[in-house]
Image (cartoon, grey):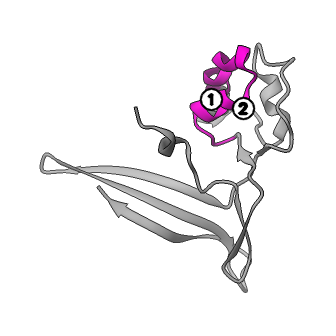
Amino acid sequence: MAGLSSLLTVYGATASGNSRFTFDGKINISTAGIDVLAALLPMENADLAQALADYRVAKADETFVNDIAQAGWYKNVPGAGGISIDANLITVSSDFFRIIATAKRHQKSYTLNVVVQRQKAQGTGQWECKTLNWQVE
């Protein structure tokens, strides 16, 4: 069992300028893992977590088919229409992300685990990612 560490995240932090962050504690339901989604749902509906996760990534011809830009998107998942998740707990945007990439070379596998911050570049206003932490396993 991985314990609580597998459920802890930097998600929920928001950049507030000058390398400072605020932590509103909201969970991005558009990226949260199945265990976290299950914890957000009423106990008797925790089995819908997989359906929510599947809904987020459903594609047709390599195009995502479901709009998950609004916090209430989960109500469109079959069986979840009558469920309510406290709006003070959820969001659909994040400024921090974990990227896990694995490569193989000569029968050896390398996994890179990176935490990045999404931010707008000064001057251009274009989005860029700043690496906050990385680790090779």
Q: Single out the mark in the foreground, 2 or 1.
A: 2
Any mark on residue 40, and which? 2
Picture coordinates of residue 97, whole percent (x, y): 58, 56
| SS assignment at label 1 | helix
Picture coordinates of residue 26, whole percent (x, y): 75, 49
Quarter-of-image position of residue 45: top right
Q: Of label 2 and label 1, which has the lower sequence position?
A: 2
Residue drawn at x 39%, y 51% is 101
Which secondary structure class fits the magenta region best? helix
Quarter-of-image position of residue 69: top right
* Residues shaded magenta: 30-54
Residue kind at label 2, given as amino acid type: Leu
Find out whether residue 47 is within the magenta segment: yes
Q: Is residue 114 above or below residue 67?
A: below
Q: Name the quadrant of the C terminus.
A: bottom left
Residue drawn at x 77%, y 36% is 67
Residue kind at label 1, given as amino acid type: Ala
Any mark on residue 64, and which? none
Any mark on residue 53, and which? 1
Residue drawn at x 76%, y 46% is 92
Q: Dot 1: few (<14), some (14–19), or many (≥20) neighbours within 10 Å?
A: some
Residue drawn at x 60%, y 57% is 10
Picture coordinates of residue 1, whole percent (x, y): 40, 31
